Image: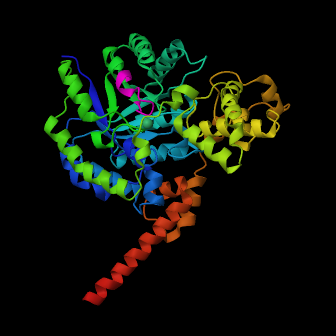
Amino acid sequence: MKKVQLTETVLRDANQSLMATRLPYSDYEGILADMDKAGYYSIECWGGATFDSCLRYLNEDPWERLRGLRKNLPNTRLQMLLRGQNLLGYKHYHDDVVEKFIELSIKNGIDVIRIFDALNDFRNIETALNSVKKYAKEKTIASGCISYTQSPVHTVDKYIEMCKELKKMGFDTICLKDMAGTMSPYEAENLIKGIKDAIGDMTLILHTHCTTGMAYMTITKAIESGIDVIDTATSCFSGGTSQPSTETMFYALQQYGIDCGLDEEIINKVNDYFKPIKQKYVDNGQLNPKSLATDAQALVYKVPGGMLSNMIANLTDMHAMDKFDDALAEIPKVRADLGYPPLVTPLSQMVGNQAVTNVLVGERYKNISKEVKNYIKGEYGIAPAPIDPELSKKVLGDSMPVDCRDEDKKRTGEDFTNAKEALGDLCRCEEDIMSYICYPDQTLKFLQNRKAQEENEAVYTIEEM
Ligand code: CO
């Protein structure tokens, strides 16, 4: 029997896409024991924006959350999303920090680490991969992830080449990450057939979003073309900017005679559990119903939805909405000049802002943002295609581009020493240090709160006696 397995994303990507990752652990702890029996390929529950959100908004220790998930989901693979050398942030960390982060993630309960780089510069995911291999337990899976985008240089052949490279590097599975939901059924068919031919029986995963309305068609074609795993979200947290619905895909797959290993009763129970939770956040405004709608603009304008709304907000702020059409037309030109980077954070913002600047200033690249300069210098990695030579010369002058890996490779241990020093007696474990390295201000505040809370409780207990 043909088999396609499902990764449930409600705890991470659906939560992140629909409600800015504001679900506290206490909201869903009560359903974890059931979810453990559902039969998912994995549950995506950590990484991405969850770490930042725990510390910044939810007064939760992200590591504590992970241990809770592990305890209540003993039989299910716990999955996280990792931004390669950037871990869960936007800057490159030193290799020793990346290694420690992965050691602690596995130690605290993660099984599947999905690793990507915004530019698909695989040098930026190599340290993470090697660290996973170093600290791997029996069930650990290193998943190599490709940021999917469309451009003249992103051909099927190019993607096949990338997959072969990921396989050669030693990844256990490969994931195609269509973050903007712009992969069409036609593209999925060509891509997945080509990749499957090239990588043999290695597990291939498709991650997409319903944003433009294409996801169900695309997934159906992907299944016909040999995909092994798809990402879905329990139905009340599906659709819009989130993933397609778990129960719907289960129903459709069943009729095809495709086994996805899910327990129908349990996946329905999971959805029943999350319905009132969703309603709570719709009512308090944290879940904007707009994010549940279909928005095909990304297909018309060839830019992700988030990027477009960002641009409209910027232009409105500057009372320059009359330049909207010009700015829109400038985006593909800037992207071409920069060597067709995938339009994913932070590159989508960089390209969008530069396009707006070019139009508003009235002269292309008269003003170049610091971020774009750093990108041209090579600090983010190697662009998918050569950067426009004239633009490159304008930024670099006579100097050579830098190798973004040179700085990463310095294993001085100073990040750890500095964090320890900054935290003083607030620090109790390596996890505290790692949180501080990733999000210093938020972690300091969180740990100060923790200490104050405990002291209050201690006083209270003594008085009670
Ligand atoms: Co996603």
Question: In the rendered structure, does residue 395 fall within the stretch colored magenta?
Answer: no
Tell me if I can see residue 17 in this picture: no
The one of 362 and 373 positioned closer to us in this rendering:
362
Residue at the image position 32 percent from the left and 26 percent from the top: 229
Question: In the rendered structure, does residue 216 fall within the stretch colored magenta?
Answer: yes
- The range drawn in magenta is 208-218
- Say if 407 sits above or below 30 in the image: above
- Say if 45 sits above or below 224 in the image: below
The one of 323 and 146 positioned closer to us in this rendering:
323
Q: Position of residue 412 (x, y in %)?
A: 61, 49
Q: Position of residue 432 (x, y in %)?
A: 46, 59
Image quadrant of residue 401?
A: top right
- Left or right, 425 with reference to 92: left
Work out which quarter of the rendered image holds the N terminus and state it.
top left
- Left or right, 31 with reference to 174: left
Image quadrant of residue 400?
A: top right
